[in-house]
Image (spheres, rainbow, N blue to C red):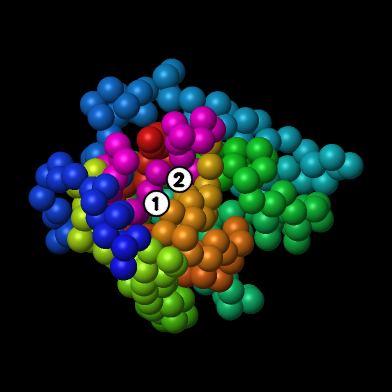
Amino acid sequence: MRLSLLLIGLLTVLAPAQADEIVSGSTFLSPELHRQQDDPTRNPAWFWVDQGRDLFAAKPSGGGQACLDCHADPATSLRGAATHYPQVDPSSGKLLNLEGRIEQCRVERQQQPAFGYETAEMLSLTAYIASLSRGLPMSVRTDGPAQPFFEAGKAFYERRQGQLNLSCKQCHDGLVGQKLRGDTISHGVGTGYPAYRLEWNTVGSLHRRLRACSLGVRATQFDYGSPEYLALELYLAGRAKGLPVETPAMRR
């Protein structure tokens, strides 16, 4: 209880919460940071996009097909792909996010070892592929085979966790627009990830951000790509339905 009160005491009101209208995290950026995000010549995350484009066209070490060999003209063939992830893989029944789909192609199609989360290769490829959907509205499926995963993510979002006994919902619904240690609390949607965060001084995945949130409330940090974070990612994507993809975004 004391820890929870301490955290609430760190919050200062910036604007009334608007829980009924879910908006992008970019809404809460300073005007200068927003301009930097929208300018490819000033947004450092575009370096990762450029590296991802090169990697997409490169043959794997030891030979084999490049991503480009199967996905010719990616600006057209993959336009909109990121708006549909996470999604359930029909062959395995597993929930895959964009990173998971890339790894699946890498291992099963290219017969190469997996990249792994937060590697330069994975971040670059994910940033590049997601950037091809920049400006398009999120449109993940949350019904049918995806519904159990969506409900699991919703339960995670609403469940109090950690020593601070806080839920995602308490901050990202009830305290939107307020300040926490100099940062403005948003609705917590992941439409800009992979994103360049100033506190990281680099690009990171949404799951890196989720792990940081878990640490912040002194709760269990699940592994990158864990079922818990995948389900939460789907729920957040469902909340973001209709919001545009902003990758590569910038965040504080």
Amino acid type, mark 2: Tyr
Q: Which residues are magenta?
A: 180-202
Which residue is label 2 attached to? 193
Q: Secondary structure at mark 2?
A: loop
Residue displayed at 31% across by 68% down: 1
Quadrant housing residue 125: top right
Residue displayed at 29% across by 29% down: 34
Which residue is label 1 attached to? 190
Quadrant housing residue 35: top left
**Residue, far top:** 41
Q: Is there a contact, CB below 8 Å, between mark 2 and mark 1?
A: yes
- Helix, strand or loop for the magenta stretch, by majority: loop
Residue displayed at 24% across by 43% down: 179
**Residue, far front:** 2
Q: Give the side of residue 208 with respect to residue 175, left or right.
A: right
Residue displayed at 30% across by 55% down: 6
Could you tell me if residue 44 is visible in this image?
A: yes
> Crowding at label 1, few (<14), some or many (≥20) Cα neighbours within 10 Å?
many
Q: Give the side of residue 205 with respect to residue 32, left or right.
A: right
Asked whether 131 or 155 is in front, the reply is 155
